Image (cartoon, helix red, strand yellow):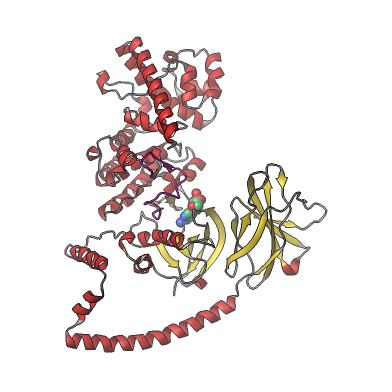
Amino acid sequence: MCRLIWDYSTSPIGCGPSLVAAVKKDWTTQNAIALSWQEAEQPHAAIRDYEIKYYEKEQEQLSYSSTRTKVPSTIVTGLKPSTAYVFHIRARTATGYSSYSSKFEFITGDDDSEEASDQGQVLVIVTAAVGGFSLLVILTLFLLITGRCQWYIKSKMKPQDKRRTQYQNGHVAFPGIKTYVDPDTYEDPTQAVHDFAKEIDPSRIRIERVIGAGEFGEVCSGRLRTPGKKEIPVAIKTLKGGYTERQRRDFLREASIMGQFDNPNIIRLEGVVTKSRPVMIVVEYMENGSLDSFLRKHDGHFTVIQLVGMLRGIASGMMYLSDIGYVHRDLAARNILVDDNLVCKVSDFGLSRVLEDDPEASYTTTGGKIPIRWTAPEAIQYRKFSSASDVWSYGIVMWEVMSYGERPYWEMSNQDVILSIEEGYRLPAPMGCPVALHQLMVHCWQKERSRRPRFHDILGFLDKLIRNPSSLLTLVEDVHSLPESPEELPDYPLFISISDWLDSIKMSQYKSNFIAAGYTTLDSISGMSIDDVRRIGVSLIGHQRRIVSSIQTLRLQILHIQQSGFHQYVRSFRDKKEKTQERENRVGEQNCV
Ligand code: ACK
């Protein structure tokens, strides 16, 4: 968001009709206003983004601020309480800006009136509570005396509630073991929210700035005043205006799930706002945001022990979830949050059932939406999600962490990922990855799910590595001894030329560097070290890492070729290409994935 001096002489004048209509206020707080508007039905070109210009009504012609958004809604923050603001909005397309919409005026919430209404509300609540309590005491005494308590409760229960109570009663028989309750088993989902999440008075929340966008609305950072305690930093997920009842239920589902968890490696729910607008979910604030972007921003900055510490945290959170019977289904670095002490916490629970929110999720032949690169084969093929499929995803998260946020399987298409996994291909170790960690990853990616480790085993293994750091000193690059028998070799992808190979890892731009430096055969590159890769002019660390990882794979493949004969290699390469082509045709016909 930028604050500019209002200067009519330089003000950009838009052209063409305004592409923005019916700007409306969704909600306000003392320092924020949420707006949404309608897009033009048939803009002459695709809308790239919107610019929202606004200023204090009293300050017109002195200064204005502006902010941008890619979607037709925004939350404007940092405003003064009880102050009138004027907004107008224009769209940007490939051909430039449209004209501004007409001006819209909205007033922010009033500090005092909220306090006053709070006090009013408190008075009403206290009066009602005293009255209600007296009534309850009288009724309880009556029921106790007549011995009708049990009968009364049972007779008022719905069959579904009875089932759940039995389940929880079963659970009571094993004190200390907590069991996850699926909010979808509630007839009334609102009840699940009340059971598991605290209602927060909105006057205790101060929204400070927008930090991202979610499926249902903006994610903001802000402060929460806790009763009798100081303010704490929080992240606030908001539900944008104009929602349907189903969207509201799906949005709050995350709170019903998160509210059941209590673990230092699971994101903590502070509470919800459901009784006023906007509907919000308030969670603890994680200073370093999502793990994937955090790692990409700090490529190469951490020691192996620090990275293992992060992985340990995630494994510990996942062990807690699997112990209480919760299957995440969308475990990925983008769904892990990092605080300022590098503590990693598992988040993003609400959509684990439908996976609508995950930009990585795509439709499969079975109709579900699944993040292919992170998902175990049995979950992709027949939606068999379990803690064992979460373990597969955990292996991918390990790979993401050790490669500082590299995209699993790079630019391979989803179909190629599925096919390669089916054929036994597994991600090679990232550069600088200790052998022990890559072995653990490969263990998590066993086809047979019962053979994968459990989170308990993973945590134990990582703890051993942390206690004995010398076990992390052997890096995959240092291992030159190859398996004795070719049967032990996984079926790695096969390439015929340097050009083929570079295309497959989306590094085609370096073809001329390899040729100019005299690397013309696959055999010649198999001996290249990271220094050789640097020397031929690959200067970006991410590209060096990708090329070297792939060379390690090629080394194994070349040995395989030497042992099984060149003709067989060419045959299998052709078979593979034909198979992929066939599959692509099939998939194209079905228009899926
Ligand atoms: O990568 P980020 O900075 O971290 O951008 C995304 C954005 O909101 C949309 O999800 C950030 N985010 C989500 N939850 C939190 C949280 N509890 N604390 C801090 N940032 C968060 C996330």
What residue is drawn where x is 54% and y is 62%?
242
Query: Dividing the picture into quarters, in which one does residue 403 lie?
Result: top left
In the picture, the quarter occupied by the C terminus is: top left
The one nearer the camera, 304 or 570, is 570
In the picture, the quarter occupied by the N terminus is: bottom right
Image coordinates of residue 473 in percent, x first then y, are 34, 33
Query: Dividing the picture into quarters, in which one does residue 186 lie?
Result: bottom left
**Residue 268 appearing in the image:** no
Q: Is residue 306 above or below residue 221?
A: above
Membership of 353 in magenta stretch: yes
The one nearer the camera, 582 or 199, is 582
Highlighted range, magenta: 348-368
Image coordinates of residue 98 in percent, x first then y, are 72, 50
Query: For this view, does 89 lie left or right of residue 315?
Result: right
Q: Is residue 422 above or below residue 52?
A: above
Q: Is the stretch drawn in magenta largely helix, strand or loop?
A: loop
Query: For this view, does 497 lie left or right of residue 308?
Result: right
Q: Is residue 577 above or below residue 104?
A: above
Query: For this view, does 32 lie left or right of residue 88?
Result: left
The one nearer the camera, 307 or 401, is 401
Report how many numbered discs are placed on residues in the image: 0
Image coordinates of residue 325 in percent, x first then y, are 27, 54
Farthest residue to the front: give it.
589
What residue is drawn where x is 67% and y is 71%?
83
Image coordinates of residue 185 in percent, x first then y, are 30, 61
Query: For this view, does 102 lie left or right of residue 154?
Result: right
**Residue 569 appearing in the image:** yes
Farthest residue to the right: give it.
9
